[in-house]
Structure formats: C-alpha cells, structure tokens
Amino acid sequence: MPVVVTFDLDAELHDLEDIDEIEGTMSSQMQEDKLMHSVLEGDKKTIEDGKLIQDAVNRGLGGFTPDLMFKNLVQNYSVAKQLYGERILRLATGYDPNYLEKNLRIPEFRKELRAALGRNIEHLKDAGFLDSNENISEKGIALATLVMYTEELDRIEPRGVQGERVHKKRAAYGESGEVRGWKSGDSFRDFSLRSTLHTALRRGHATVEVNDLRSRPRISRGSISIIYGLDASGSMRGDKLEVAKKSGIALAYKAVQKKDKVGLIVFGGEVRDTVEPTNDFRELLRNIAKVKASRETDFVGTIERAIQSFPRSSTTKHLVLLTDALPTVGKEPEQRTLQAVSEARSAGITVSVIGIQLDKEGKKLAEEMARLGEGRLYLAKQLDEVDKLVLQDYAAMDAQ
C-alpha cells in the first residue's frame, strides 16, 4: 500500500535552532568525540595520558624513548628530574619521584623500572598517542588539548566573567535601549509610539505635544578583537607554560562566548605561530596546546605581527602580552620594544602586560609598556592566579 505524505503549507515554524558548522574530517571529529567522552567520564588512565603528553610538550619534548629515559634517570637523577619534571616521572614510570631517587641504585629496582617504562610507553603507542617512532602524534595532541581544556573550564566556570558589554552608541540595528525624550537627530525607527501616547495621557494633554515625544534608541554591543601574546621562551618551560596555555584557553572560551574574536601570537626568539582574531574556538585550542618553549624573547616582532593581524574595521583592538622576562632579541631590545608599543597605540591598539614573577627591571619595562599602550599591568606572584588576571584584563575592556 503506498504511503502518502502531506504538507501543511500554512503551518508556522517554531523553535528554530542554529546548526553548528563542524569543520575537519568526520573521522577526526569522531576521534575527538570519543576522547572527550572518556575525559568527561573521568577515565583516570586516559586523563593521566593526556597530562603526561601535555607536560612533555610544555617541556619541549617531542616524545618518549624508554631506553633514553632510563639512561638519564640512572646516570644523573637530579638532571633527569629537571629535564622531565616530577609529573612526567610519576606518570611515565608509575613510581613516586622520591621513591625513584631512593631506590635507583638497587639492581632489582632498575630492572623493574626499565620494564615499567617500556610497558607504559608501549601503552601510549597502542592507544595511538605516540607514533611508531615514539613521537607524540596528532591524536596525542588532541587528547592533551581536551584534558587541559576541561581542567581549565572546571576552574573558571565557578568564577565566570559577569556582565554584557554595551557601548552607549546608537546603532541602526541591535537591541532597543532605554526610553528617553526625543532629541534632534534621532532616527524615526527609534520613535516609541506607545511611550509617547502614555506620556501625553499622563500629562493630561488632549493632543501630543513636542515634549511628549519619546525615543528608544537602539544600542549596540561593543565588538572586541583581542590578541593573546604568549611568551614561549626557555624560561617559560614547564609549569609557567602550562598556566600560560590554560590562561589562553580561559580567555578564548570567555571571549568567544561573548562573540568577541581572539587571536594568538606565540613568541620566543622569533614569532613562531600566529592565529588572526577568530571565533573558531577549536582552532585556538589546537594552536595553544601545541606550543613549545624556545630560547629567547622577542617583544618587537610580536607587537609588529599583532599590528598586521588585527582587522582594519573599527572594532576595539587589544593586545595582552604574557611574559616572565625582558626582551633579549636584537640591539637595544627594551628601547625598540617601547617604540613598537607606541606604534601599536598609534594604530588604535591598546596593550596590556601580565608579568609572571618579574624581577625589578622586568617590572619597570612592563610598567612603561602598559603606560604607552594605555593598557594595564598585572603582576602575578603565584602561577595559580595568572588565568584570573588574564580574564580580569578582558573584563576591564568594558570600561574603555
């Protein structure tokens, strides 16, 4: 029996929903979905694998070679501890670092340690987090990204960044603002008939008088393009780089929520990676997660690249630089840095600095940069307050 399908042409559509555009291949999307499911379900082993990989990236390690790790641990534990850090040692070996140090001279323990390193690194290969050459794979980076993202989200969601930015400028489109008296130059589309009639009746006027006219001008939410300048010089290696990355994730998450655009510039001895201001949160996540530390610090190149990367539109443009040291690239790097900040300000860009444990000279330069850039200076003495300061700087843009 045939099936007859009918359509009601007079029907109205209700509860329309936006369809999110999914970028990338279907296979990579499914892979990330599975990893995210494991992370959200609290799969301890998967989460530990993600932390291990992210720590390796933060310390400039491209992968894990069990024989090399074993050799480093046995030959000089102090140097190995400095190279890998306590968390990598704990997760890669399965032993507490203090226990490792006390027992490394025992032959039987060395034998078990070598076997444990082999098992744990082979697991990472079997899971696809390391490739056949024991280098960190794209899947490994994806897992580390998701773990870092969920950890930071757990931190910032209870705090939040409250409020909706509203610029008190008239706009042809947008939400209606407060009702006020009609002013010369108001648009007819802002004329409020209801409020005008109500005012005339309340005043007992038989006809509408000029003073009764009411307007409800539309107001627009200010648009911000912000670039996060992340210092990935050698002094940032390890925990500092981790908190810098998580702070970038926090900024991207909050700004994209408010439909602002966020860009990224990673700098060390030179500008290495750039993401122009975007609403693509996934792209920002990927680029933040894969940042590795280098050697020197180049503020000038970063500021010059930021000037080129900001859109030419009349949006608010803001550069926030996160660093723990003075610039070291080129001749007279400090003077050239201040000149670059002045050029950025002339291009309509404000500049803030978030200093991590700066020394006296570093603080002095940062103060001058913030002054010339008409931005703000935040000094972080503890690493766990860096993301809060980054979000504070973003929230302060409301006052500009």
Image (tube, rainbow, N blue to C red):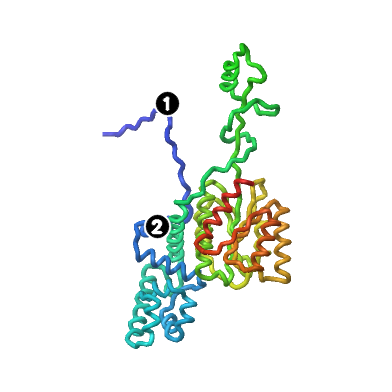
Q: Is residue 255 left or right of residue 145?
A: right
70, above or below 289, in the image? below
**Residue occupied by mark 2:** 36
Q: Which corner quadrant of the image does residue 327 belong to? A: bottom right
Q: Between residues 196 and 9, which one lies in front from this camera angle?
A: 196
Q: Residue 304: in sight, yes or no? A: no
Q: Give SS at disc 1.
A: loop
Instruction: Name the quarter where the N terminus is drawn.
Output: top left
Circle 1 crowding by C-alpha within 10 Å: few under 14, some 14–19, many from 20: few
Q: Residue furthest left?
A: 1
The percent position of residue 119, horizontal first and vertical second, equals 34, 76
Q: Give SS at disc 2.
A: helix
**Residue occupied by mark 1:** 10
The percent position of residue 298, horizontal first and vertical second, equals 65, 67
Q: Which corner quadrant of the image does residue 332 belong to? A: bottom right
The percent position of residue 49, horizontal first and vertical second, equals 39, 67
Q: Between residues 24 and 100, which one lies in front from this camera angle?
A: 100
Q: Is residue 139 left or right of residue 115?
A: right
Circle 2 crowding by C-alpha within 10 Å: few under 14, some 14–19, many from 20: many
Q: Residue at x 52, y 64 (%)?
A: 382
Q: Residue at x 41, y 28 (%)?
A: 11
Q: Specify the amino acid type for callout 1.
A: Asp
Q: Between residues 338 and 368, which one lies in front from this camera angle?
A: 368
344, above or below 188, in the image? below
First in sequence, mark 2 or 1: give its number: 1
Q: Specify the amino acid type for callout 2.
A: Met
